Amino acid sequence: MWKLVPVVLLVFVAACAPGPGTPPATTPASTASSTTAPATTAELITVPDVSGLNHQDAQNRMQAAGLYNLREVDGTGQGRALVLDRNWVQVAQDPPAGSKVPKDTVITLTAIKYTDR
């Protein structure tokens, strides 16, 4: 069996090699006169002010602005889940309103229950 391994390996290598008369594969060189535009800076979105809004309206306003990577935090520090969004009021946001951010920026919305006031 061990005598077959070199023969099989040789056949495999020969099968992978280009045939006679086949030009070698080349990668086109990049040229200075490229027709593609250079990479541009990502479009920036102005973060809306959602302070004082109920959490559902705050989410809606962020999404209307094009910001979908939203993180919600219980502002009391108790780690409660914001289950019924309309029962919570926004008390903070990060980044702050008016900031210019890329669309994939994490927006942290901090809220408390209306009954926590």
Image (tube, helix red, strand yellow):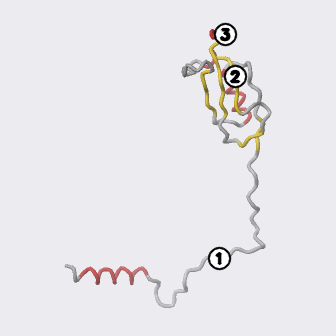
Which SS class for mark 3? Answer: loop
Labels 2, 3: front one = 3
The residue sitting at 75% across, 61% down in the picture is: 38
Circles 3 and 1, Cβ within 8 Å, touching? The answer is: no
Quadrant containing the C terminus is: top right
The residue sitting at 65% across, 31% down in the picture is: 108
How dense is the environment of label 3, judged by Cα within 10 Å: few (below 14), some, or many (20 and up)?
Answer: few
Q: Above or below — where is 57 with respect to 71?
A: above
Q: Position of residue 4 (x, y in %)?
A: 24, 81
| Quarter of the image where one finds residue 74 | top right
Labels 3, 1: front one = 3
Horizontally, residue 34 falls left or right of residue 25, namely: right
Mark sitting on residue 117: 3
Mark 1 vs mark 2: which is more N-terminal?
Answer: 1
Q: Which residue is mark 2?
A: 57
Residue nearest the observer in this picture, 117 or 4: 117
| Amino acid at circle 2 | Asp
Residue extending furthest front? 77
Q: Which residue is mark 1?
A: 28
| Amino acid at circle 1 | Pro
Quadrant containing the N terminus is: bottom left
Q: Position of residue 62 (x, y in %)?
A: 71, 31
Circles 1 and 2, Cβ within 8 Å, touching? The answer is: no
Q: Position of residue 47 (x, y in %)?
A: 75, 34
Which SS class for mark 2? Answer: helix
Horizontally, residue 80 falls left or right of residue 68, namely: left
Give the Cα distance between marks 2 and 3.
19 Å
Give the Cα distance between marks 1 and 2.
53 Å
